[in-house]
Image (cartoon, rainbow, N blue to C red):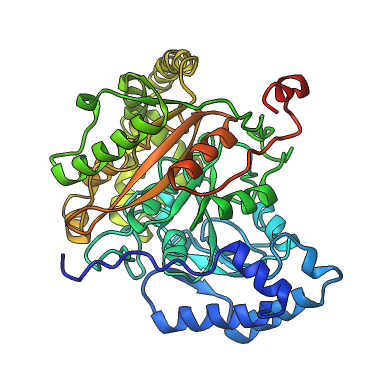
Amino acid sequence: MADVAHGPSIGPSVAEILASHASGTGCPTKTAARVADAIAARGDDGTWLSTVPREQLLGAAEEIEKRPGARTLPLYGVPFGVKDSIDVEGVATTLACPDYAYIATATAPVVQRLLDAGALYVGKTNLDQFATGLNGARTPYTIPRSVYGSDLISGGSSSGSALAVALGQVPFAVATDTAGSGRVPAALNGVVGFKPSRGLISTVGLVPACKSLDCISLMAGSIDDVDRVFDVVVGRDDRDAWSRDRGVGYRGAPIRVGLPPPEDLEFFGDAVMRDAHMSFRAQVSRTCTVVDVPLEPFLAAGSLLYQGPWVAERLVEFGDFLAAQPDSIHPVVRSILQGGRKYTAVETFAALQQLADLKASVARLWQSMDVLVLPTIGTTFTVDEVLEAPIDCNTMLGHYTHFGNLLDLLGVAIPLGTTPDGRPYSAMLLGAAQTDDTVLQLAAKLLDEPRAPSYSTSIDPVAAEEHV
């Protein structure tokens, strides 16, 4: 690699920031100043597309301090970033396409919940244009690079959100995940990427990529930070057609972990990454109840995403802009959007029927397991490699993530360290819809984080009593 790999420099956690503010050793304005200084010191590295000017950021922090009962707010003065496909009132939403940009007239509910909880909005983070891509290089702005070395891709499309956390500038950031956009950049930057069950976080105020699949996700440095933020942003929103309730909490029973046969795993010739993952699997086998699970139905579903009619769904939002201003769109993104025009209604229904069959097959697998453990990515790429072969590299990056939302799964990408050659490797934990708490519980265990079981109000009290 061109530069010596160094990895993430995670800053103060949400809990540490709150403790500092509560004790008086710190305060929101001091935290705001630290964040502004850290961002300024980096310059234009492709992490942020816009930030609140320093004096305005300090002023916003002061306003939080003046709120009645401010110190009791769950995110009192905690700074955060927002992917630039999500609206913040009065701020440009660009989707990394200057000619598409508009000034938002309302704030997305996910952001408003954070603001109401006392969190401090810092700015908008970079992304693959129109949230189309998993590599971070499809942007007209500065191409962001992984914290593990300047020639390694950052991953996308939520590239800036992952970097803002990995660089220690903010403890968490709001991202999205339609096909892996919140998990792949987390894996490439050594942070936690949490894609909850679709519909648990409102997507109102998000410019859709594929509206039937889109999901708000979270980037953070730990499961505890994910838990704290998720508790704030989760909630039914009847304006969101896909909105639904959170589901039951983890009940304390042993978690059954599904592992596919090693020969079903694909690392694209990357023996070093394969060895790292197999070592991790051995650890899981020693500490968890393991069941064998076929991977084929998951991968078959994933192949439908970009090799099937779902790519045409992107034209619902961007079709008119593509027709009117094609030259304003990144060439690779433009070619993907144009590819959606070839699908017929017959092909769409055939794909929907195929997906229904695959969902039924996968649903049967959840009867014997609670969490499926896979690599988040099978290999890594440099920026030059992605620019040379953008579609092929992207397909490989999404090998384990493309099927997630099609099959209505949730996923958590967890950092596991570095390979002997200094690259990051990550595991992905997948669960059936609305089993978020169980998956997060296993994630915390594998990361050796203490976490008390959480019980939502929708738990059957009799069933819960059995595990007391």
Rendered-image quadrant of the N terminus: bottom left
Can residue 351 be seen?
yes
Nearest the viewer among 59 and 436 is 436
**On screen, residue 110 above or below 458:** below
Can residue 315 be seen?
no
Position in image of residue 439 (x %, y %): 52, 35
**On screen, residue 324 above or below 142:** above
Question: Which residue sits furthest right?
Answer: 68
- At horizontal 25% and vertical 68% (from top left) the residue drawn is 150
Question: Is residue 261 found left or right of 291 in the rendered image?
Answer: left
Question: Is residue 98 found left or right of 268 in the rendered image?
Answer: right
- At horizontal 32% and vertical 43% (from top left) the residue drawn is 336
Position in image of residue 86 (x %, y %): 57, 56
Asked where in the image residue 462 lies, by quadrant, the reply is top right
Question: Which residue sits furthest bottom?
Answer: 55
Nearest the viewer among 320 and 336 is 336
Question: Is residue 309 found left or right of 173 in the rendered image?
Answer: left
